[in-house]
Image: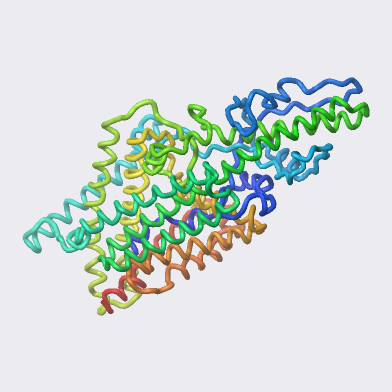
Amino acid sequence: MAILSETAPNLYYTLHPLNYEEHWILYSVRSSSTLPWGTMVGRPNHTHSRTVSPQKSPAKSMPTDTETRGIGGADAGSCDATVPVVAAPVSDLNHHTESASTAHPKPKRSRSASAPRHKDRSKALHYSFKPRPSPLDFETLERDHNPMRGFYVLFWVAMAWYAITSILDTWNKEGMSFRYAFFSQMSDRSKDLLYSDLLMQLSCFTVVLIVKLYEFKIVPLNFAWIVNSVWLGGWFVSVISWALYSNWKWTQSGSFTIHCIAMLMKQASYLMSNSENFWKLQQIPKLESDLAVLKSDFENTVDVNKMADNEKEIVRVNDELRNLRSHLTGQITGLHFPKNLTFFNFVDYMLVPVLVYEIEYPRTEKFRPFNFIHKTAGTFGTLALLIVIVENNILPILALSNELNFFMTIMKLIVPFMICFLLVFFIIFEFICNAFAELTLFADREFYEDWWNSTSFDEYARRWNKPVHEFLYRHVYLQLIATQRMSKNDASLATFFVSSLFHELVMALTGKRLRPWLFLLQMFQLPLIMFAKLPFIKNNKTVGNAFFWVGMFLGPPLLGALYAREHYMNP
């Protein structure tokens, strides 16, 4: 059971946000009347539109084309304007933070322009994805001449040798090559599981119809958060209820619940992202009206100071307008929102190994059949190795739970559980995610970073399970700050709490009993994170990394001893 829990999206470890991105929160806060809970809060990017600083001059001169591009050339509410952007270094983030907190002079506005204006959230356009290789893909290691690639080969040679010795040992003891008890359990009622999972995925397409209701204004955008919440809540309760009613084995229940949570996140991101995009689309004609008023004031003003203020405001509003259009334009082919809201676009989104929705994703130039076959074969080969380890090194220990004391159970499970953890990591992030990425030509293969070099659990959070990290950061952490006015610390704690509840839900449905061990262990990691920030550990990378690995070695077997022993002692 504890092994399977490691396959769940690791919600807690994705909690900690990247510090250099937190400036975006300043652009995300606005009144709840303009954007209700349930719509997306975008993430930052290190690109922004070039803004030309206006010069104060007594002579009247309208801002140049560079400053005013985007005022014309597009109809009201359209997002078809071409958007020039330039790269901004990380050092420019301080400029964004200062400008976001500075009050801008308000010009005279017509009635159409007097509606409440949102804060400029669009200055930092962010595309979360870009072409990147998988860190542990052997082709990448060879191409980059990574000096550690020999250890990668050593690991798999050791795993192959272990499989061979296990097969020989089983043959000598029992006269057969494999033990099939665990495999038989995994394949029990496999057709029921397959049909249920297929039906669950088909039900996700309902969100396309819901978004179409917003597009054709059948449902007002102000009620989008209610419709989104009702659908997601009802769908999740229905699917989880079906899992309980089906009464599968713990392996089937666990895998189905994990996939259910992943599909819930995909649907939530699709609904929240597109609801946000419709809101942005509504702001464009308002901003264009503001620009018309500002231009009129500029032309009719003789006061030098008012002219300078109007010129700054024209540049600022135009910059915001230009960036809003950028948010509504795909990063690859320039596909404009809402032209992306099609059935085939959602099919592609369901297949791409991501949990957050964007109009377009970076793509590779061609499909590589050999790479896809390699990742697919690696999935099944590593899964077979995982089954061998569970059959030979874990289940026999758990079967003796009535004879072994708690401490000896943990000691005997440490090594096999850690090996299983590494194999599950490879199966999910290196093989399955990369196989789907190759199938869909998805170019961003960095589903994880070098988490094994982490010196603390918050550093591990930034490197482990990046798809879930992206979802939690966008749709939970920033959402709580933008709509609920939470502080960063409170939002982090709330995100941590939500992730812990989802983890415990997986374990409860897997073991058919409610025991808060995983929830409590995750809460215990809060003081561990604080402990890792002590100067002695923080300034000594080796000590910090050793402290991290001690926690990783003890965590999975401890969970196995807490959950699985009870299952075997009280079936």
Furthest-right residue in this view: 303
Q: Decide: is 256 above or below 131.
A: below
Front residue of 294/146: it is 294
Query: In screen coordinates, is 321 left or right of 297?
Result: left
Query: In screen coordinates, is 27 left or right of 186?
Result: right
| Residue under the image location 49 percent in, 59 percent down | 230
| Residue under the image location 63 percent in, 36 percent down | 324
Query: In screen coordinates, is 256 left or right of 517?
Result: left
Q: Position of residue 149 (x, y in %)?
A: 36, 38
Front residue of 369/6: it is 369
Q: Does residue 299 appear in the picture of this structure?
A: yes
| Residue under the image location 26 percent in, 79 percent down | 402
- Residue 119 lies in what quarter of the image? top right
Furthest-front residue in this view: 218
Q: Decide: is 548 above or below 314.
A: below
Furthest-left residue in this view: 175
Q: Does residue 388 appear in the picture of this structure?
A: no
Q: Position of residue 331 (x, y in %)?
A: 52, 31
Front residue of 326/1: it is 326
Which quadrant holds the C terminus?
A: bottom left
Query: In screen coordinates, is 237 left or right of 480?
Result: left
Which quadrant holds the N terminus?
A: bottom left
Q: How many marks?
A: 0
Front residue of 390/332: it is 332
Q: Position of residue 387 (x, y in %)?
A: 23, 57
The type of colouring in the image is rainbow
Q: Position of residue 371 (x, y in %)?
A: 29, 34
- Residue 327 lies in what quarter of the image? top right
